[in-house]
Structures are given as C-alpha cells and as structure tokens.
Amino acid sequence: MAFTQLPLPYDFNALEPYGMKAETFEYHYGKHHKAYVDNLNKLTDGTELADKSLDEVIKTTFKDASKVGVFNNAAQVWNHTFFWNSLKPAGGGTPTGELAARIDKDFGSFDKFKEEFSNAAATQFGSGWSWLIDDGGTLKVIKTPNAENPLAYGQKALLTLDVWEHAYYIDYRNARPAFIKNFLDQLANWDFAAQNLAKA
Ligand SMILES: [Fe+2]
C-alpha cells in the first residue's frame, strides 16, 4: 500500500492572520511535503517496506546505512504531518492542565520552557527541528538535524517546529528568530501537545 500525504488540518490561508501565508503552504505542504511522500513511495515500491506502517519504516531504517534515503523521506513525511498539527489558527498562549503542570515541574516555568525551546530552534545549525518531548516521564526540549526525530530515538514527541529554511523563508526571509517567536506567540497548538502527552 502506498504511503499517502494526509490533508492539512486547516485551509492553506487559515494562518495568514497569524504570520504564515498561504504561499508558504503552497510550497511547504504542496511541494516539499508532497515530494517526501512521492520519494518514499518510489524508494519502497516493490520492497517489504512498502507494506509497513510509516512508524515502522522510520524505526527500522534509522541508522541503517543502506536505507538512508528511505529513512530521510519517511521521517520527513512523519515530521511534516506532526508539524502541521503543531500549528493552529489563534494558537500560542499557554498550555493548561496536566501539560502546564508538567512543564512547570520539568522546566521551572513556562517562560523557562519558551527560552529553552527558542534557543534550541535558533541554534540548530542548518536544517532540522526543535521538539518538546516526553522522554520516559520527563519533558525535555531537543533539536534534531535534517530528518531525525524523537520517534527514531524512542521518545514521545509532543510539539515541533520545522526550522529548515524552507519553513520560514517566504514569511520571514532569513529571520529565523522572528519565525520562532511568532510560532510561540500565535501558532503553537497546545491542545495537540496535551493529546500527545495523554497517549499511552
Ligand atoms: Fe519542512
């Protein structure tokens, strides 16, 4: 069965009032994300990997020198779907409930978390991702290069920000810090993060 590109959880123009243009989604979702799906299907067509779940493909090809292309495309398919869900119109603000309590416990405060997350996103050299994760019961911020993700590392992802240049160049040109600030102020989907935290 071929791997598919899941629909965006909102319209292309839904985030325009919150700092991300429809043009960003025309390229980032319509071209970059789609290309990862198409490449993954080309690379796995006719192989035993074609019948595995996307999660299984990512876990089984990570660190396999003969499957670098499969891993990179599979992980980028997963990462982008996770990223679209990490954004929502009129997001940002502060989390509530269990997630807020866990952030306070493990980072000291929500402001400390924001500082750590912003720093990870700003200092990921070149292409990659910044993540809030649950690592065996402790919430942490990590950054990953290229396509690597918490799923491959055996950790649970809660929220992510794509810091590949293609993620912000249309809206922010080279100003990655402005893109990061806007994500935390207006886009971060804390409901999605809370749902991920609650998953077994
Ligand atoms: Fe991306």
Image (tube, grey):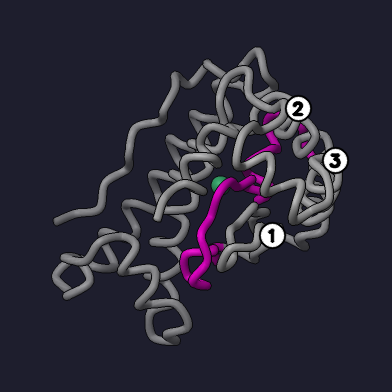
* Above or below for 183 versus 12: below
The residue sitting at 62% across, 16% down in the picture is 16
Residue identifier under label 2:
185
Q: Determine whether, in the image, residue 68 is placed left or right of residue 193.
A: left
Q: Position of residue 41 (x, y in %)?
A: 26, 59
Instruction: Give the x, y percent position of residue 135.
Output: 59, 66
Q: Give the magenta part as a residue range.
A: 147-174
In the picture of the structure, the residue carrying the numbered disc 1 is 140
Query: Residue 24: within the magenta?
Result: no
Residue found 47% across the figure and 56% down from its top: 76
* Amino acid at the residue labelled 1: Lys
Inter-mark Cα distance, 2 to 1: 20 Å
Residue beneath label 3, please? 111
Task: State yes or no: Cβ of the residue under disc 3 lies below 8 Å from any atom of ligand 1.
Answer: no
Name the residue rendered at 73%, 34% in the picture. 184
**Gap in angstroms between the C-alphas marked 3 and 1:** 14 Å
Q: For mark 2, does the 10 Å Cα neighbourhood hold few (<14), some (14 to 19), or many (20 or more) residues? A: some
Tell me which amino acid carries mark 2.
Answer: Asp
Pick the front one: 104 or 150: 104
Image position of 167 (left or right of 196): right
Q: Secondary structure at mark 1?
A: strand
Q: Is residue 64 left or right of residue 118?
A: left
Whether label 2 touches label 3, CB < 8 Å: no
Which disc number belongs to residue 189?
none
Q: Nearer the viewer, residue 131 or 99?
A: 99
Quadrant placement of the N terminus: bottom left
